[in-house]
Image (cartoon, rainbow, N blue to C red):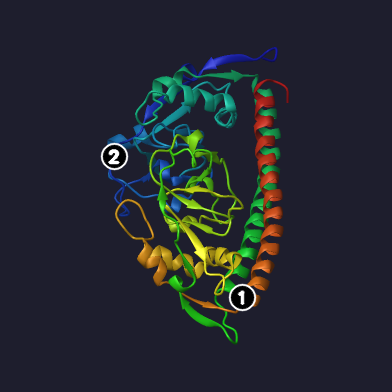
Amino acid sequence: MKKGWETKELGAVSAINYGYTESATRELVGPRFLRITDIQDDRVEWDTVPYCKIESADIPKYRLASGDIVFARTGATTGKSFLVDEPPEAVFASYLIRLRLLDKKLLPEFVMLFFQTAGYWQSIKDGSSGSAQGGFNATKLGALTIPAPPLAEQQRIVGLLDEAFEGIATAKANAEKNLQNVRGIFESRLQSVFTQRGPGWVEKRFDEVCAITSTLVDPRKKEFLDLTHVGAGNIESKTGVFVDLKTAREEGLISGKFLFDESMVLYSKIRPYLMKVARPDFEGLCSADMYPLAPIPSVVTRDYLFHLLLSKPFTDYAIRGSARAGMPKVNRDHLFEFRVLLPDVKKQKQLAANLDDLHHETQRLARLYERKIAALQALKKSLLRQAFSGEL
């Protein structure tokens, strides 16, 4: 640690309190009632925060003030924090902890930056392990130690990081917008292909377009042990890219699987909104929760079928037929009742080739923007690490 810096326990320099227990309401019956779910993207839209009933005598105990930091103590968002700034009349809910600094030599903005560091998040992870709900209580929060440079140094660090983070946020927002636009280009083109109708196009039921010709096999048999296994988790949504593939032997499979080959299209019938479709270039086994669809060559090409299964008209149809308790799933009867307009095979090849070219280019650009976003996130972490180790 940098010379002249101290370390302080949060419990020794702040008042740490649990929030108020009450039901939220949209009726104006008391002050605003801040909950974990009201904190989104490091912001609170106070106009949308509900109210709660509370006795007037209890309001001072739970009232939020500028400089307070509220902290999620349980659930998936454990450790998430928010620095309060000029709030309306508001109290905070019981699943939040409020940290109010008593030491005037610590800036709330500096402490809030500490709550974004990798070291802080590791402490949250370590302190939450073993808890059924992943909780982190006030005692654990108070035991955390924080670097405490002189006040002027804190002000300098806050100023530098605020300026840097503003630039990073702007660059990240631009990259995310560009990423969204790139994805939208392909989705728009895909939509236009499968909503158009040209001369000579014919309507077909899906069972006239493709079939399931595979039968279930025992993956423990010698002839299947070294075949690659594909489950829904091995296909990226919307892209058809395979990830983390292993053999039946490596996965220790025991339940029946479908055989497939490179002539087929694999479609995941679980959660159709995830749009998991793939064109394997190898023989293998697929989960019983996938359909290995064999296109009828005189009616449809494999590539055209692949893009059709990713189209909005088909996905909307699949979603409508998948409503069931627990797990949304497209059954075989519903799948094969789908009706589709098809051009001749020559036109299908042309359209599918154009879609493949566009998909390849948009995926290239998407990866570029994804890498840029990841680099910006890494830069933010690096600046935080430097700041709290005295290197900034």
- Residue at 46%, 74% in the rendered image: 208
Can you say whether 298 is above or below 150 in the image?
below
Task: Say which label, 1 or 2, has the lower sequence index.
Answer: 2
- Residue at (39% x, 45% y) in the render: 256
Q: Position of residue 174 (x, y in %)?
A: 68, 53
Residue position marked by numbered label 1 in the rendering: 345
Amino acid at pointer 1: Val
Of residue 261 and residue 230, the one placed in the foreground of this image is 261
**Number of marks in picture:** 2
Quadrant position of residue 357: bottom right
Q: Residue at x 44, y 41 (%)?
A: 219
Instruction: Determine whether the residue tagged by mark 1 lies in a helix, strand or loop.
Output: helix
Which is more toward the observer, 245 or 18?
Answer: 245
Q: Position of residue 352 (x, y in %)?
A: 64, 68
Residue 45 position, x and y percent, is 48, 50
Q: Is residue 321 visible?
A: no
Instruction: Report if the CB atoms under discs 1 and 2 are less than 8 Å apart.
Output: no
Which is in the foreground here, disc 1 or disc 2?
1
Disc 2 marks a residue whose amino acid type is Ser
Q: Quadrant of the N terminus?
A: top right
Left or right placement of residue 53 versus residue 122 in this view: left
Residue 114, image quadrant: top right
Q: Quadrant of the C terminus?
A: top right
The numbered disc on residue 57 is none
Q: Residues within 10 Å of mark 1 (few under 14, many from 20)?
A: some
Determine whether, in the image, residue 312 is placed left or right of residue 25.
Answer: right
Task: Say the numbered circle drawn on residue 56.
Answer: 2
Foreground of the two, 93 or 91: 93
